[in-house]
Image (cartoon, rainbow, N blue to C red):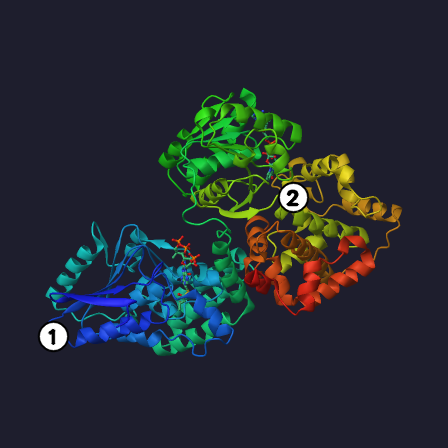
Amino acid sequence: MSELVTWAKDGAIAVITVNNPPVNALSPGVPEGIGAAVAAIQTDDEIKGAILIGSGATFIAGADIKEFGKITSGQRREGINFLELLLAIEDSPKPIVAAIHGTAFGGGLETAMACHYRVGVASAQVGQPEVNLGIIPGAAGTQRLPRLAGVEKAVEMCAFGAPVRAKDALACGILDRIVDGDLLEGAKSFLREVIASGAAAPKTRQRNEKLGNAETNAPVFAAARSLARKTKRGMTAPLAAIDAVEAATQLSFDDGCRREAEIFRECLFSNQSKSLIHVFFGEREVAKIPGITKETKTYDIKLAAVVGAGTMGGGIAMNYANAGIPVLLKETDQAALDRGLATITRNYANSVKKGRFSQEVMNERLALITPTLDYSGFDNADIVVEAVFEGMALKKEIFSALDRICKPTAILASNTSTLDIDEIASATSRPEMVIGHHFFSPANVMRLLEIVRGRATNLEVIATSMALARRLKKVGVLVGNCRGFVGNRMVAPYTREAQFLLEEGAKPHEVDAALYEFGMAMGPLAMGDLAGLDVSWRIRQEFKHLEKPGIRQPLVADRLCEMGRYGQKTGAGWYRYDENRRAAPDAEVEALIEETAAAAGIERRAITPEEIVERTIYALVNEGAMILEEGIALRAVDIDIIYINGYGFPAWRGGPMWYADAVGLQKVYERISEFHARFGELWTPAPLLKQLAEAGKTFAQHDKER
Ligand code: 3HC
Ligand code: NAI
């Protein structure tokens, strides 16, 4: 018997335990171990039933995702065949109860569904999150789940991947009982009841009563497909999962499993799946920072403070309150403070209205936010996040005040999006405690937190920031200090190219449509209108002195701002907006573009969507390669995670650097070299890109060889 799975006897009950930390994934040896235990219990007449349980933090959290890469790369020849093991469990004449804590996800839930009964603690969650990896359940999940929970619930879980809490799992028939107190003891008493009843062990695959009929199922599948097209735009796995559940309603169990296996394989070998698996491991990889180990000391964060209750400060304070951390929120005058608090209250009230949490939770969160007009209480704060206007003089003034007031162990963070963290730190006597915490707007929604390391920032402050990001339910990515850090530095050439394309002949809606079709959450011009064109206008003015003479600059954005067209907030920017903030192309803007281009002597021509995508996305990639070479990002995957979580880059394309790998760095380098010859210095190929392209390598290989 493998160490990964052990079993022991307690009178008539056998307890089969999976010991494969950290998440008891079905790695090689685990399915075999479970199979051997199930076979062994059949040979002992004293045993009347068994419990399958996970040791440590969780039940089985799924197949071992690392194995998928081995299969698709040819490193592992045989596929993964859990189906036979699951049939052996289900065919056991002795009842088997899955005892669930933590998460029964993917192959974990599929294993549990092959058991005859399932019990779980109240905090347990079940789910089929495979679509998030670009695949579908591959061990009969799409066939057993509709039999257990009904077609609608199965479609929802398999196509959209969200976890289901124990209470709901009980209600829909996935769980048979919620256990209070000790899980194993509860499972044993459940099993004793089953044994005493003498009932035959029920097989999920033979239960057809919840499968509905063609007439009742048709609208369920139609609604799910339409929702998947809208909310999972561009992704193939959600639609594939719906097809597989539909097969369960049309075919026998065995044929349905065969159909599921075909669809699973197609998905597994797709670029989307490879990209999404890259993102899954990437989100965990970014937490690994050279020099930081489990032993690195972190500071306790019990009280936070935020300076500035504007767009960002209010959202940042909400993050702390949502994580249960009390937070002081400082403004300069009562009116600004009232405005900030009113926005926070409105945001919370909207969440209550949408049923995300109760009024009681909202009240608890609001009570954690203490508004103030001075620095009282800041001497106790463990962290202060500054989110005042973007101006160096003001930021330095604030940091100098914080340096006087805050305790020596307080972390002093700035939410600046462009300014030099070292210069801000120079206003204090403790630059080692200063760091950038660059949240994204809306700060209470966006998952990304760029953590900007200054020259002097100490490792403990970085480690605390990374741990804090997790507590705030953000993906924290450590970046170096340069203008715009990683995300905004890369977005600059991206939006620059979008605007050059306008001057050369494309219309705003054509540029945005090409990138939306590529999979971006929105096009660059619509994004500018949403963020406010005045924001980048001010930044351009602040950095005007750094512009190199003779280098082409976009011409139209400044003109729009001079006309008071700041985007959505003024009802007009690149587009015109109605009272519901719906955008429409604006002839006035198109005329302005044409006139500006003519005055600058720019020849206009027809521009294809392909050129739009190449010019903008390769601009991102080229800047990303420079950032990587300079060490501003630790790894290419860090850039991918930043772009997916902060800039609406489609996760199913894996991020800009992964996408470039998929296109082929040689091709990307060739196109960039052509653009260089055609458009000049701005397109100078990044040396690292050239080097990797010439060596026939990828950014992913470069990450591995670091
Ligand atoms: N396979 C391989 N490694 C896994 C894994 C899996 N299924 N799930 C988690 N891990 C690894 C992580 O990479 C991480 O490794 P690291 O420490 O080296 O970075 C470690 O386990 C801990 O993971 P987290 O940091 O994510 O731990 P949390 O406690 O925050 O979350 C979790 C635990 C909720 C289980 C989360 O890890 C998760 O959602 N995992 C993926 C679950 C999943 O997608 N299951 C379906 C797999 S596909 C499948 O089952 C196909 C089947 O139908 C045939
Ligand atoms: P904002 O203008 O909405 O809010 C700034 C607030 O700071 C104002 O309410 C102002 O009254 C207050 N303030 C000014 N001086 C103060 C002081 N001495 N004490 C207390 N409060 C003071 O600005 P926004 O958009 O929230 O930006 C704040 C910071 O966040 C800037 O550094 C900006 O670059 C950065 N940022 C902005 C993003 C955005 O999308 N808006 C995204 C990421 C970062």
Residue drawn at x 39%, y 68% as measured from the top left: 142
* Disc 1 secondary structure class: loop
Q: Residues within 10 Å of mark 2 (few under 14, many from 20)?
A: some
Q: Is residue 185 left or right of residue 75?
A: left
Foreground: 521 or 309?
A: 309
**Amino acid type of the residue tagged 1 in the rendering:** Asp
Q: Nearer the viewer, mark 2 or mark 1?
A: 2
Residue type, mark 2 in image? Cys
The residue where tag 1 is placed is 45
Name the element at disc 2: loop
Residue 194 screen position, x and y as percent: 15, 64
Percent across and percent down for residue 191 are 16, 62
Q: CA distance from mark 2 to mark 1?
A: 71 Å
Is residue 587 in view from this perspective?
yes
Determine if the C-beta at disc 2 is less than 8 A from ligand 2.
Answer: no
Ligand 1: quadrant of the figure: bottom left
Q: In terms of depth relative to the viewer, which is nearer, 104 or 478?
A: 478
Mark 1 C-beta to ligand 1 under 8 Å: no
Q: Residue at x 72, y 48 (%)?
A: 585
Residue neighbourhood size for the residue with mark 1, other residues' Cα within 10 Å, grouped as few (<14), some (14–19), many (≥20): few
Quadrant occupied by the C terminus: bottom right
Q: Return the x and y of residue 651 as percentages of the image width and height.
A: 55, 58
